[in-house]
Amino acid sequence: MTNHKKEEFRKVRKRSLVIAVLFALFFVTATIAGAKALYETKSVPKGERHNIKEIIPAKAKWEKVVTGNGGFMEGINFDRKGNIWMVSPMTGELLTVKNGKVVSVANYKGPVGAKFHKDGRLFMTDLSGVIQAYDPATGKSSIIVDSYKGKPLNGLNDLVFDKDGGLYFTEPMGSSATHPVGRVFYLPPNSKEPVLFAENIAYPNGVAISADGLRVYISEFGKNRVLSVPAKNAPPSPETPFVFGQYEGGIGPDGLAVDTEGNLYIAHFQAGEIIVQDASGFKYGIIRLPEGAGTFTTNLAFHDGYLYITESSKNEVWRIPVNKKGLTPYGLQ
């Protein structure tokens, strides 16, 4: 090898070493930053950490908003005009509220969850294993997702958009506490091909994203608990999936909602209550539905200073004033 070639070789090696060192520094810095955000040391409180009165006013009372005509109302959402939208998997209906009454808008095989997209369309998971998008402006529907790697999806349940328009959705059908084969998928923005996000879950039901966007909360209905999983696009971090909340009584957690402070609100099915936890998983307490209401608490949504709840055994929508503000959904941004 000539001296000239040897010199060129040394220069190439030097550049490669510099690039490798810079990459390593970037990775370590990103990892430390992620770890600091999620594992920051906090002071131990002197007394009780929380009280449910931090969430709801002391004299807050439930108000019944509307009662439906049969079915199984859930998947509550608000559009930009403040109109309520819901679905009923038992009757296959997309519903809205007009003049104080529940009105059927369209029919599908078994819509379960619903979330608005920024473009005004309402995306709905279906028991048939598809995600439909309904356009209120035209009344037309289109199928967004119906398979994974060429194979049909099992029955779907809930969904949530991230800040970029990516979509997380749950596939619980066929899974249970003794057969934990449920899955959660992520559909990247402007894509038609979902990617597997989490698996081996005992009936993944509700799904939500933390206020900082770093975690995805999944209701593991079959084990009466909520899981926390690092978000698909979260920066490198040592955090791994863990049990965010374990509950007792009822059957399991259903729909989820998050406020601007990072608190998580859990609709506890067959318990007739909402469980509230802070961003570290510590409980504020529970908000129990009023006497005479049913116990099928399925979904919840924030709107104009209230927390709205669907109770599906009696097909009722209830609301209660809250001291916190809910995260602005992707569809209303």
Image (cartoon, grey):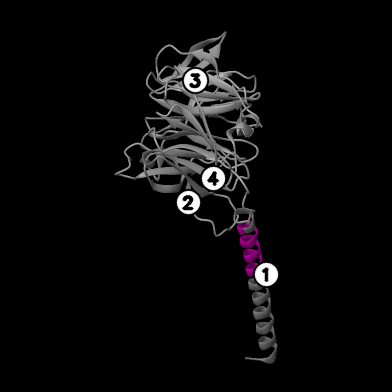
Of labels 3 and 4, earlier in sequence is 4
Could you tell me which secondary element the residue under label 1 belongs to?
helix
Using the numbered discs, state the Cα–Cα distance from disc 4 to disc 2 in whole angstroms: 11 Å
Of labels 1 and 4, earlier in sequence is 1
Could you tell me which secondary element the residue under label 3 belongs to?
loop
* Residue type highlighted by circle 3: Pro
Residue located beneath label 4 in the image = 281
Using the numbered discs, state the Cα–Cα distance from disc 1 to disc 4 in whole angstroms: 36 Å
Q: Residue at x 69, y 91 (%)?
A: 3
- In the rendered structure, are the residues bearing label 1 and label 3 in contact, judged by CB atoms less than 8 Å apart? no
- Going by the picture, which residue comes out furthest to the top? 99
Of labels 3 and 2, earlier in sequence is 2
In the depicted view, which residue is nearer to us: 208 or 38? 38
Crowdedness near tag 1: few (<14), some (14–19) or many (≥20) residues, C-alpha within 10 Å: few
Using the numbered discs, state the Cα–Cα distance from disc 3 to disc 4 in whole angstroms: 25 Å
Of labels 1 and 3, earlier in sequence is 1
Using the numbered discs, state the Cα–Cα distance from disc 3 to disc 2 in whole angstroms: 33 Å
Q: Residue at x 54, y 45 (%)?
A: 281
Residue located beneath label 1 in the image = 22
Q: Is residue 32 magenta?
A: yes
Residue located beneath label 2 in the image = 242
Q: Nearer the viewer, mark 1 or mark 4?
A: 4
Indicate whether 98 appears above or below 199. above
Residue located beneath label 3 in the image = 290
Classify the position of the N terminus by image quarter: bottom right
Q: Position of residue 181 (x, y in %)?
A: 34, 45
